[in-house]
Amino acid sequence: MRFFVPTNIYIENDCVKNHADLLCAIGQRALIITGHNSAAANGSLNDVTNTLIAGDIPYLIFSEVEENPSTDTVEKATQIAQKFNADFIIGIGGGSAIDAAKAVALLLVNPDINADEIHNAPNHPRNHAPVVAVPTTCGTGSEVTPVSIITNHKINLKKSIPHVIFPELALVDGKYLASAKKQLIVNTAVDALAHMVESILNVKSNLLNRMCPEYGLKLWGEIKYALLLDCDNGDKNGAAPNATPIDAILYEKLMLTSTIAGMSIAQTSTAVPHGMSYDLTLHAGIPHGPAVGYFLAAYVEVCAKFVPQDVEKILSLLGLKNAEEFREMLCKLIGTCTVTREMRNQFAAAMKENHSKLDLVPGKITPEDIDYIYKKSLVVE
Ligand code: NAP
Ligand code: ZN
């Protein structure tokens, strides 16, 4: 059994300011990578730039990362990093900005890798420039995972690149969630939930690495009432009568849970629901959290055939009575997803060949099981 997360992680209010010395010790010249607006709006960018100015570290900002970052964006940011002679990368934002930062950190010191070839470039030990991650969503856990998920539109592929890129430093501050809309918090929290469920329902799950998802699911079970309160996608009956709205204390708990969920998949990787989500995002434009969440209940149902005690444990940690309650909760949080019958059939056919994910199922999953998951998870128009 092994547990490995080499990232120096701080989770606290005013994290960036509190650990300015660590941030400034990572390198001499920084490229900051963000999405279009949110990092400037939620104060995270300001916290980082003030720290770099005080530490006399020159920096440049690249604020063009789109949701589900593309090889083109990674290529553009790498050229800017090279021209600026950056020697470390700071990713501020959701998983998209942090994943892009990781890919740029790889390309910066490996000029032989072309961005369009990044998914196929050999992953023998590769250096990368150091990465600092400042998450502003509560879902991907990318600040503590070795994974960078990049989309190549030229070949219609959304997939993690094969290289191991753990951030050196993760500065996690819940206050950056204050500017996020409720549905963004819900969507990304569902992603974190999926990370923990898929980490347990996984052949790589063991007594040592379960400490993360088991603790994280208990936290998620406590947060769920606030997520369900006034949820746009359902009636208000999902929340406990004394549920309170999401506030500053919950922001920290959401971030903690998300980082723990990231530590979970850093050990096991994600499983079938994530494998299924990528086509839904790529071809139907569904954001990552719901795209994964739509498949989660049916995956749990199928896994109950193989590892019933693990499914029971997951449900009890979440404070749910049975798999049906799990399905109903997800439906209230993210609604349902409609695609054409043709799309659903194409996605299912592709998934049947996705052995890297299917081999992680803790039992012999059949083509019929895969069809069942698609039928239960996606409505056809
Ligand atoms: P995201 O794609 O990074 O961001 C979604 C949206 O949220 C963007 O429009 C962004 O705006 C906005 N946003 C971010 N923080 C905000 C805040 N605090 N307040 C208001 N708006 C905010 O979403 P995500 O779900 O965090 O990341 C999804 C990506 O991560 C996917 O590509 C997924 O495949 C990947 N992922 C990676 C891992 C991993 O281990 N590396 C794991 C799971 C998923 P701006 O554009 O203005 O910033
Ligand atoms: Zn995810």
Image: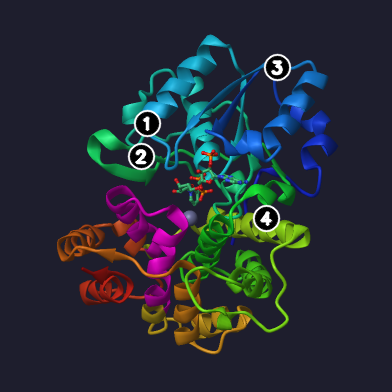
**Structural crowding at the residue carrying mark 4, measured as other residues with C-alpha within 10 Å and reported as few (<14), some (14–19) or many (≥20):** many
Disc 3 versus disc 2: distance between alpha carbons? 30 Å
Q: Secondary structure at mark 4?
A: helix
Determine which residue is flagged by label 4: 255
User: Decide: marks 3, 2 in contact (CB < 8 A)?
Assistant: no
What amino acid is found at the position of numbered circle 4 in the picture? Answer: Met
Task: Find the distance from the CA under tag 2 to the CA under tag 1.
Answer: 6 Å
Q: Which comes before the other along the chain, label 3 or label 4?
A: 3
Q: Which residue is mark 2?
A: 151
> In this view of the protein, which residue sits in the foreground, 321 or 312?
321
Q: CA distance from mark 2 to mark 4?
A: 25 Å
Q: What residue does disc 3 label? A: 28
Judge: label 2 CB < 8 Å from ligand 1: yes
Q: Is mark 1 within 8 Å of ligand 1?
A: no
The residue at 33%/64% (across/down) is 358
- Residue drawn at x 72%, y 72% is 244
Would you say the magenta stretch is mainly helix, strand or loop? helix
Q: Is 13 in the magenta?
A: no
At label 2, which amino acid type do we have? Thr
Residue of label 1: 71
Decide which of 179, 120 is in the foreground and name it: 179
Instruction: Name the quadrant containing residue 15.
Output: top right
